[in-house]
Amino acid sequence: MRFAWNALAVGALLFVGCRGGEQTAPESPPPPPAAGSPTSATSTVTGRGPRAEDGFPAIIALDPKQPRDFPPPTEPKIMDQQGLAFVPRLLVVRQGQAVVFRNSEDVLHNVRVGEAGTGQPLFNVATIPGNSYTYTFDRPGFYSVGCDVHDVMHADILVTSTPYAVVAGEDGAFTIADVPQGSYTLTIYQSGKRVEQPLAERSRRRQV
């Protein structure tokens, strides 16, 4: 796997301690810090990871080192089948969040999902025209999606336990807003692969 960075040189990661400018907020904001927590300040993390490969951009995720409970969003994510393709080709889903696999075409498809890397199958269902299938992912991981009827159709799904996860731009640039200050593990996912490193709390600009 080729990354556009040395080992884990993600460019500049910036903890600013407060929000500034337009940012992309997490899809499900975390609850307020519990009483006695060291700080309630939030930060914005920006940087640059690997560029997109074969149309698949990287996903950047921050996992708190101290265990926290993040309730999953109640709104499901949608992965459609149209134009003989899965739309989107890359989907980020929270652990415990439902995904609706929808067939918006007038041809028969199926959805085959398995764990990336191991190939362990998760499910394989037919999706007839105009219908859908809903599945709730209860375990974090990277999953490959395919259609046996049309072998040109491929997609990836990342299931994460953290709300601080975003899809990077084509050039690898990313912004994660409203991140409570603390220690995190920064993980980059791309094409079923992952690379991670610790990210300690800082209040100033830092090269990683």
Image (cartoon, rainbow, N blue to C red):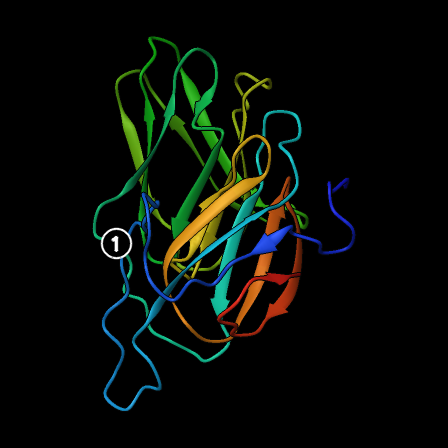
Q: How many marks?
A: 1
Looking at the picture, tell me which residue is in the foreground, 38 or 79: 38
Looking at the picture, tell me which residue is in the foreground, 61 or 148: 61
Q: Position of residue 77 (x, y in %)?
A: 31, 40
Q: Position of residue 138 (x, y in %)?
A: 39, 59
Looking at the picture, tell me which residue is in the foreground, 65 or 138: 65
- Where residue 72 sits, quadrant-wise, is bottom left
> Which type of secondary structure does the marked residue at label 1 adopt?
loop
- Where residue 178 sits, quadrant-wise, is bottom left
Q: Quadrant of the N terminus?
A: top right
Residue named by callout 1: 73
Point 45% across, 75% down: residue: 182
- Where residue 18 sits, quadrant-wise, is bottom left
Seen as rendered, the residue at the extreme bottom is 36
Seen in the picture, residue 108 relative to 98 is either above or below; the reply is above
Q: Amino acid at mark 1?
A: Pro
Looking at the picture, tell me which residue is in the foreground, 13 or 33: 13
Q: Quadrant of the C terminus?
A: bottom right
Mark 1 burial class by Cα count in 10 Å: few <14, some 14-19, many 20+: some
Point 35% across, 86% down: residue: 38
Q: Position of residue 87 (x, y in %)?
A: 42, 24
Seen in the picture, residue 161 relative to 176 is either above or below; the reply is below
In the figure, is residue 79 to the left or right of 143? left
